[in-house]
Image (spheres, rainbow, N blue to C red):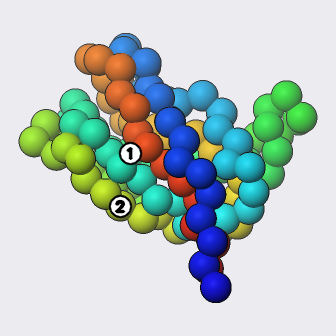
Amino acid sequence: MSSFGSWMNASISAGATATGEIDLGGLYDYLVLLIPGMDTCKLSLKVAEKTTEQGGSYYELGQDVKTDEESFNRADVWRLGGFRHIKIVASKAQSAARTIRIRGWRT
């Protein structure tokens, strides 16, 4: 039986390329995303076994997702592989703040 985590905000500030550390609150197989309009970029996922404060290091995971200036309100599912601590990274600094809605999905 599948289970889902709560919806959370993953925010990239104006002029920035990445979210802060996000604790999904549990180990999940997949990450469900609602991606708003963004400046042309690739999005990627970094994962860690534990937070930086706990001594963890972040590593890139999986494929990039391409977006363009006309892409908005796009829903996607990324393989997460059982990680709990994540960061979403854009290949280009964003001209405005962006909030991606996310939640974990366990199958």
Q: Residues within 10 Å of mark 1 (few under 14, many from 20)?
A: some
Q: Earlier in the sequence, mark 1 or mark 2?
A: 1
**What number is the disc on residue 27?**
none
Q: Nearer the viewer, mark 1 or mark 2?
A: 2
Say what amino acid the circle numbered 2 marks: Asp
Residue wearing tag 2: 76
Residue positioned most to the left: 70
Q: How many angstroms separate mark 1 from mark 2 (CA)?
A: 12 Å
Residue placed furthest toward the bottom: 1
- At label 1, the amino acid type is Leu
Given residues 104 and 21, the one toward you in this image is 104
- Above or below, 21 against 101 in this view is above
Dot 2 alpha-carbon crowd within 10 angstroms: few under 14, some 14 to 19, many 20 or more: few
Nearer to me, 18 or 31: 31
Number of the label disc, if any, that sits on residue 43: 1
**Does 55 sit left or right of 21 as displayed?**
right
Q: Residue at x 35, y 28 (%)?
A: 98
Please give the name of the residue rendered at 43% of the width and 18% of the height, measured from the top-left corner.
13
Query: Are the residues flagged by discs 1 and 2 in contact, CB closer than 8 Å?
Result: no
In the rendered image, residue 87, in percent from the top left (x then y), is placed at: 58, 40
